[in-house]
């Protein structure tokens, strides 16, 4: 791109390969960008709330995903448009930071852009709109802090945590088992939580699924479940007080790094080589026995000879266990991962109260449970379900619930759900707009209108009259000055979300408003789009 001047001194821009590029400028560019972002938001709008619909996505190689999680839908959608990709990034950042509220954040951003479009048509400058939105988002976040409530929970009283996780799960496919799954999520998080530091490492919670069985058969295992079985069918299937050797070296004779050739021209030489190999295996197995190991878990495979020897020496073994699972087993059992047989000592063994192999159904599927570990800081949630898609969706739903429980341990402030927080913020922003001089007050009012998009979508998805329901709840909030009134999606008969026990985390709600405002400001500031034209 170069700047040139004509004979009258007027500047004009020369673009390289101009005929191959398309260029949209000014208001048209902003409108095109807003339309692209709204198209993405419109897709997610129907999947908001407890009565939200699910989306079915087919990948290019035929894998089908059915989900109601905003971040997953957008990840799989393969959006071409650059502004659409910003919306995908928006829901992804909400997912990384908070884990929940990925649909709401995109719906809010879409509504803000919709309002901005009307202001642009009236001739308000985009920078003015962006500044007004920034002011309004500050007012909303301060208001959220005012209406938030701390809620106390302890290891003996986890009910508040369970209630919040149930709110998250109520909008998913698994909502008929939400009580059970919420309890599992809370137990799992509290098992690995460091309550003094107020931190939870979710890597210590392994989520494993197996097709077959009912969703109700999902269980929390105080230990590790791995999708492997004993390497030899005649090895014992149950080991109590196991001492586990965790190895990352193969049960094989060493292979020299250099290229070599062994010439065997007599039977004696072959026998000698074979004897040497057997002796090598013997030493390996003996070393494991000498340090007192009663179970060997190996990252690599071992050949039939080693397998046979292990069986005869009464040393059960598991092979081909992945690196991440090995680390979890080491954390749970308090063992050390040993890279060479020479370094194996009795201090490096992990301890588990019970290791058992469990078979499922009539198939040959077996899994290994390592339970009652020395250090119970690693747990597994074992999900059962009718088909693969159901299990994948349950994993995603459970991830959201685990994140919510983690956020509450980090910061135990909550706001009430069902759109009540948004309606309350909308009223607060509307009231503050009167005090703001200048053009920005239009943008602040537009922000207040946009906040109503979430409760409106909730009402619409629940089959209620959206505008009637929203205005009734808004009027009731003003009359009673009660910020806990929201949309009654489940037809319980009360609008009070406090009675319905519908909570959301304060940090999740704040993040939604701040992230949506940031993205909208960014989109509004783009006034010139130069893109290579499609062939």
Image (tube, grey):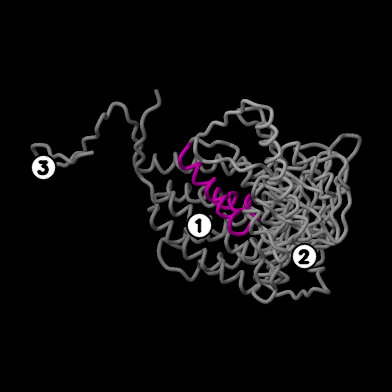
Query: What residue did someone put label 2 on?
Result: 376
Of callouts 2 and 3, the N-terminal one: 3
| Secondary structure of residue under mark 3 | loop
Q: From the image, give the main secondary structure of the stretch colored magenta.
A: helix
Tell me how far mark 3 sits from mark 1, CA to CA. Answer: 41 Å
At label 1, counting other C-alpha atoms closer than 10 Å, the crowd grade (few under 14, some 14-19, many 20 or more) is many
Does residue 460 show up magenta in the picture?
Answer: no
| Secondary structure of residue under mark 1 | helix
Chain part drawn in magenta: 81-110
User: Residue sitting at 67 percent across and 44 percent down?
Assistant: 300
| Secondary structure of residue under mark 2 | loop
Label at residue 9: 3
Tag nearer the camera, 2 or 3: 2
Residue 466 image offset from top left, x and y in percent: 70, 49
User: Can residue 166 be seen in the rendering of this structure?
Assistant: no
Of callouts 3 and 1, the N-terminal one: 3
> Residue 373, located in which quarter of the rendered image?
bottom right
Q: Is 376 or 519 nearer to us in this picture?
A: 376
Q: Is residue 95 left or right of residue 316?
A: left
Which quadrant: the C terminus? top left
Residue projecting furthest to the left:
7
Label at residue 517: 1
User: Residue sitting at 72 percent across and 52 percent down?
Assistant: 468
């Amino acid at each position: 791109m170069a700047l040139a001047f004509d004979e009258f001194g007027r500047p004009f821009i020369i673009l390289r390969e101009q005929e191959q590029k398309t260029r949209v400028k000014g208001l048209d560019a902003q409108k095109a960008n807003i339309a692209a972002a709204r198209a993405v938001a419109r897709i997610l709008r129907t999947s908001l709330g407890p009565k939200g619909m699910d989306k079915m996505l087919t990948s290019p190689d035929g894998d089908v995903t059915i989900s109601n999680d905003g971040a997953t839908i957008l990840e799989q959608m393969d959006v071409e448009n650059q502004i659409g990709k910003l919306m995908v990034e928006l829901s992804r950042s909400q997912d990384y930071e908070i884990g929940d509220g990925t649909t709401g954040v995109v719906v809010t951003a879409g509504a803000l852009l919709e309002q901005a479009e009307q202001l642009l048509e009236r001739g308000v400058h985009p920078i003015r709109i962006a500044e007004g939105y920034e002011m309004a988002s500050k007012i909303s976040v301060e208001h959220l802090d005012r209406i938030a409530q701390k809620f106390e929970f302890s290891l003996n009283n986890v009910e508040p945590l369970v209630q919040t996780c149930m709110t998250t799960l109520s909008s998913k496919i698994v909502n008929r088992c939400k009580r059970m799954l919420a309890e599992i999520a809370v137990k799992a998080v509290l098992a690995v939580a460091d309550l003094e530091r107020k931190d939870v490492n979710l890597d210590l919670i392994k989520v494993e699924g197996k097709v077959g069985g009912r969703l109700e058969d999902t269980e929390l295992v105080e230990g590790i479940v791995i999708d492997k079985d004993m390497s030899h069918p005649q090895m014992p299937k149950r080991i109590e007080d196991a001492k586990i050797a965790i190895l990352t070296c193969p049960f094989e004779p060493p292979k020299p790094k250099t290229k070599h050739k062994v010439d065997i021209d007599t039977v004696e030489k072959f026998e000698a080589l074979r004897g040497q190999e057997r002796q090598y295996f013997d030493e390996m197995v003996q070393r494991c026995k000498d340090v007192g190991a009663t179970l060997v878990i190996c990252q690599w495979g071992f050949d039939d000879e080693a397998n046979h020897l292990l069986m005869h020496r009464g040393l059960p073994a598991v092979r081909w266990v992945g690196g991440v699972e090995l680390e979890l087993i080491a954390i749970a059992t308090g063992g050390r991962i040993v890279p060479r047989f020479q370094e194996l000592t009795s201090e490096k063994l992990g301890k588990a109260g019970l290791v058992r192999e469990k078979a499922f159904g009539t198939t040959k599927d077996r899994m290994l449970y390592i339970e009652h570990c020395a250090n119970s800081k690693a747990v597994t949630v074992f999900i059962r379900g009718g088909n693969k898609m159901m299990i994948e969706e349950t994993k995603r739903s459970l991830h959201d619930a685990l994140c919510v429980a983690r956020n509450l341990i980090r910061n135990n402030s909550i706001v009430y759900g069902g759109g009540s927080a948004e309606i309350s913020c909308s009223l607060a922003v509307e009231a503050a707009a009167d005090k703001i001089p200048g053009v920005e007050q239009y943008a602040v009012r537009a922000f207040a209108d946009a906040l109503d998009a979430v409760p409106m979508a909730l009402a619409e998805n629940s089959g209620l009259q959206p505008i009637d329901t929203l205005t009734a709840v808004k009027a009731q909030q003003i009359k009673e000055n009660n910020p806990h009134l929201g949309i009654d999606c489940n037809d319980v008969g009360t609008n009070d979300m406090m009675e319905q026990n519908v909570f959301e985390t304060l940090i999740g709600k704040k993040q939604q408003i701040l992230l949506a405002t940031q993205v909208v400001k960014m989109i509004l500031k783009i006034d010139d789009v130069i893109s290579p034209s499609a062939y």
